Amino acid sequence: MTAPLTTTPEVRGHLTRVLSGQAEVRNESCRIHGAYAATLMPNGKWSGCPECIEADKEQQRQAEMRERAGQASAGRLEKLREGSLIPRRFQGRSLEGFNTDGRRDKAFALTACQRYVERFADRLEQGGGMVLTGSVGAGKSHLAYAIGNALLDRGYRVMGIDVYELIDLIKERAFSQKGGSEREAIKAFVAGLDLLILDEIGAQLGTEWERLMLFKIINERYKQMLPTILISNIDAAGLGEYLGERIVDRMTEGGGMTLTLDWESYRKEVGHA
């Protein structure tokens, strides 16, 4: 049952007069919408411009819609971050926080990473990836995950993971789950990911099967024109021997690049990599 309206006798009387055409009115003028008929309200005040009132209501509706959209967007970004697997140590890394120490080589690397983010729509269309090589502590992971964080903030789907964790997940999905297969496990790191960041490549040689799985993931993303960032402590030549020259060469296609960070430990300078 619908609850009865709780109005005062004055309001009910006013509504009755309005509906019967007996309400007291007078001509008013709005500086925006011009002439209108104002109605004497039960509180003794005259009604305002109906078009202004409707415009105010519309602004309120739009503000509420923007607030809801903002909440939904924030929720979506939070879900993207939760699914990114980016290690906690690197979740706060940013390109702005990378210390170049006034050096041209570091500034060049930073600028290249900034441009990668700015032009990621092109990289996503063309499949351009990135290879970051260099000595331990040079800041490779900082730059790579800073790229990932910046793209997450823009709503892209990003995942960052160490290779040994990647292999463990493939084994789990391929062999531990009912109906699992290598093909389905590999697809989890291809479909639905705008950018995949693979860290610690070559840290341990692993088995031929493990290297084959890594090759298949990178190659499948290449065929689907999906960008991948590879991080390794071994140089480009060693990486070519580990993954195959063809894979490393393909990373530079579609606007991709290889950056060699061959300076002293970044951790010693700023306390993190």
Image (spheres, rainbow, N blue to C red):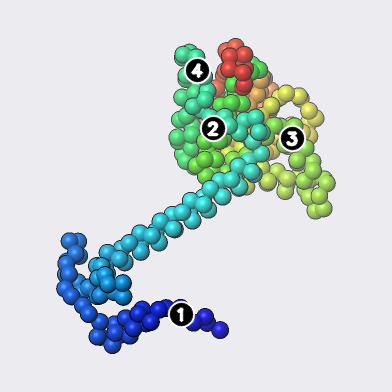
Q: Where is residue 95 in the image (x, y as percent from the top left)?
A: 51, 28
Question: Which residue is disc 1 drawn over?
Answer: 5
Specify which label sits upstream in the sequence, 2 or 1: 1
Question: Which residue is disc 3 drawn over?
Answer: 165
Question: Which residue is disc 2 drawn over?
Answer: 147
Specify which label sits upstream in the sequence, 4 or 1: 1
Task: Give the secondary structure at mark 2.
Answer: helix
Labels 4, 1: front one: 1
Specify which label sits upstream in the sequence, 2 or 4: 4
Disc 1 and disc 3: Cα gap in Å?
A: 63 Å
- Type of amino acid under label 3: Glu
Between 188 and 114, the residue placed more toward the observer is: 114
- Type of amino acid under label 2: Ile
At horizontal 35% and vertical 63% (from top left) the residue drawn is 58
Residue 84 visible here: yes
Disc 2 and disc 1: Cα gap in Å?
A: 58 Å
Specify the quadrant that holds the N terminus.
bottom right
At horizontal 83% and vertical 46% (from top left) the residue drawn is 176
